[in-house]
Image: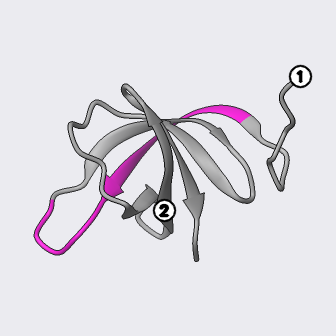
Amino acid sequence: MLANRRKSERRLCRRIAKIHWGTGSLPRDCTITDISDGGVKVVAELLEIPQHFNIIFSPDNSRKCRLAWRIGCEFGAEFID
């Protein structure tokens, strides 16, 4: 059986957000499918996901993230702020 390596409990959600990286890039739409204190699982149809980026939940709520894994259009991100 696989061990759960999560540091905090995840909660299922269906929340629209934006991904943003680098000066000059435009924020891209994504869907948060689950969230925990330590990170998020995201669905986004992006060809490239950089190693570090921001997830914008609302105009006054964003988090710095590090790409943890990716399978197709789903990926996991760890909060680093």
Residue neighbourhood size for the residue with mark 1, other residues' Cα within 10 Å, grouped as few (<14), some (14–19), many (≥20):
few
**Left or right side of 63 for 36:** right
Residue drawn at the location 31% of the way across and 41% of the way down:
29
Element under label 1? loop
- Residue bearing mark 1: 1
Closer to the chain start, of discs 2 and 1, is: 1
What percent of the width, then of the height, locates residue 54?
40, 64
Quadrant where the N terminus is found in the figure: top right
Does the magenta-highlighted stretch encompass residue 55?
A: no
**Left or right side of 10 for 57:** left
- Residue bearing mark 2: 66
Does the magenta-highlighted stretch encompass residue 20?
A: yes
Q: Is residue 32 above or below residue 57?
A: above
Element under label 2? strand
How many numbered discs? 2
Residue drawn at the location 30% of the way across and 57% of the way down:
50
Q: Estimate the spatial distance between the alpha carbons at disc 2 and disc 1, rounded to whole Å.
A: 27 Å
Q: Nearer the viewer, mark 2 or mark 1?
A: 1
Q: 3 or 12: nearer the eye? A: 3
Q: 34 or 75: nearer the eye? A: 75
Q: What coloring was used for the rendering?
A: one colour
Q: 57 or 22: nearer the eye? A: 22
Q: In this picture, which residue range is highlighted in magenta?
A: 12-25
What percent of the width, then of the height, locates residue 40?
60, 47
For residue 13, what is the image quadrant?
top right
